[in-house]
């Protein structure tokens, strides 16, 4: 059969045609034929698109707890990253089968790269590797191998220049492209860090400094530059003017906000009693320059009734979007920052198995992200 007429067009002309498409459509077109894939993955086209198209902001889901601990999964079989495009209100699926690892577990993302825990088929299950990959270009880089305890108990944090941190209560591992190995530092946190995050050159985390009978949450922070000095590593960030901001929240969690702002999200207690019920879920915002809190939004009653009976809920997001999930709630609640407390809506079609709450992260998908 004769080749389609479009294949006879010069490559420069085809690149010009494809460059008028949104990034989402460019990704789809790469799977049409070998010619399209060759053009759309060429260095010249990728460079041109990276200067013309903004990143695709997506909400990515982490695998469920059950799938994470299923150790008899064949090599990358059916491994995929499920993401939601809030602008198009549509789910997408990125195949991770190009990674030569088993038991893949995506945990974080930064600057277009996704960080995935995986087991090498040549190593025992007690060892894990953290892989940095771009699911759009299928490029990946394997970081030095670690013990499985770090993947089970550590939180993976990545900053804007792709410096990687694996954080636990007692220690922290640090990796950067200039070091090419994991550096280990002691930590002085009083308890397990909850929802740690990196903002600029600082880390922030919540810690429970209360008793076994009553939680008392505090905000801790540290500079990345103080990693080598464990005595000055973490310190409590607090002001007298904050009053009872931590006492009114049940199970607070942190999410990175817009600019130099941190969101703290939790159930709004109806009283200060030990087993107080919650009236809703509230979002507070901390300006790190002024060190002042303000209310950013609270969940409407029509949505909160689905979360009210769940003792635990999960939050994830970044910037102007935060997702909420809970056990046996087969959809996500999405908050988008705006005037008057922001906008709330449901995300249907949750692509997970099991009845546990969904976890996730934000993926700023881009073609020019190189591991």
Image (tube, rainbow, N blue to C red):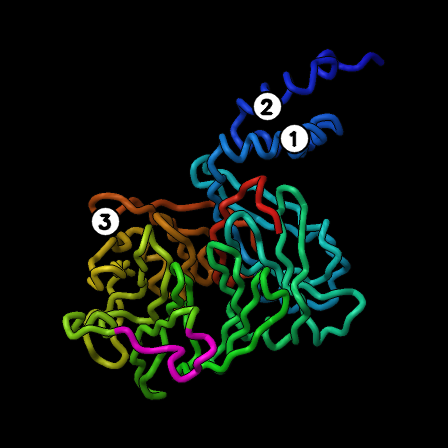
Measure how far apart labels 1 and 3 are at the Cα level.
Answer: 41 Å
For the point 49% across and 30% down, the residue is: 52
State the mark number for residue 40: 1
Q: Secondary structure at mark 3?
A: helix
Q: Pick the quarter of the image with the N terminus.
A: top right
State the mark number for residue 6: none
| Spot occupied by residue 167 in the image (x, y as percentages of width and height) | 50, 73
User: Nearer the N terminus, badge 2 or badge 1?
Assistant: 2
State the mark number for residue 18: 2
Q: Is residue 303 shown left or right of residue 356?
A: left
For the point 77% across and 71% down, the residue is: 123
Does residue 304 sit above or below 83 in this rendering?
A: below
User: Nearer the N terminus, badge 2 or badge 3?
Assistant: 2
- Front position in the image: 38 or 280: 38
- Front position in the image: 357 or 130: 130
Residue furthest to the right: 1
For the point 49% across and 82% down, the residue is: 186
Structural crowding at the residue carrying mark 2, measured as other residues with C-alpha within 10 Å and reported as few (<14), some (14–19) or many (≥20): some
């Amino acid at each position: 059969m004769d080749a389609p007429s479009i294949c006879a067009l010069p490559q420069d002309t085809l690149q010009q045609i494809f460059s008028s498409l949104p990034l989402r459509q460019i990704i789809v077109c790469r799977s049409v034929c070998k010619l399209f894939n060759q053009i759309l993955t060429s260095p010249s086209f990728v460079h041109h698109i990276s200067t013309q198209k903004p990143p695709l902001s997506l909400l990515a889901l982490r695998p469920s707890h059950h799938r994470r601990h299923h150790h008899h999964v064949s090599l990358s079989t059916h491994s995929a990253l499920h993401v939601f495009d809030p602008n198009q209100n549509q789910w997408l699926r990125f195949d991770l089968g190009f990674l030569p690892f088993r038991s893949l577990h995506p945990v974080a993302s930064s600057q277009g790269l996704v960080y995935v825990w995986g087991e090498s088929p040549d190593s025992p299950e007690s060892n894990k590797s953290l892989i940095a990959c771009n699911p759009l270009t299928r490029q990946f880089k394997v970081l030095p191998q670690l013990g499985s305890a770090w993947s089970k108990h550590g939180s993976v944090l990545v900053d804007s220049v792709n410096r990687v941190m694996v954080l636990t209560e007692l220690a922290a591992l640090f990796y950067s492209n200039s070091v090419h190995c994991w550096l280990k530092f002691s930590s002085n946190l009083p308890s397990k860090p909850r929802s740690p995050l990196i903002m600029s050159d600082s880390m922030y985390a919540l810690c429970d400094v209360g008793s076994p009978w009553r939680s008392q949450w505090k905000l801790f922070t540290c500079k990345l530059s103080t990693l080598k000095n464990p005595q000055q590593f973490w310190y409590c960030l607090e002001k007298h003017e904050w009053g009872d901001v931590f006492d009114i929240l049940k199970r607070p969690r942190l999410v990175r906000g817009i600019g130099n702002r941190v969101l703290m999200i939790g159930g709004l207690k109806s009283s200060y009693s030990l087993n107080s019920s919650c009236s809703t879920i509230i979002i507070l915002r901390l300006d790190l320059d002024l060190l002042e809190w303000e209310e950013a939004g609270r969940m409407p009653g029509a949505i909160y009734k689905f979360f009210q009976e769940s003792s635990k809920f999960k939050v994830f997001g970044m910037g102007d979007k935060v997702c909420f999930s809970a056990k046996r709630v087969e959809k996500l609640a999405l908050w988008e920052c705006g005037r008057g407390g922001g906008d709330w809506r449901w995300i249907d079609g949750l692509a997970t198995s099991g009845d546990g709450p969904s976890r996730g992260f934000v993926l700023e998908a881009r073609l020019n992200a190189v591991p």
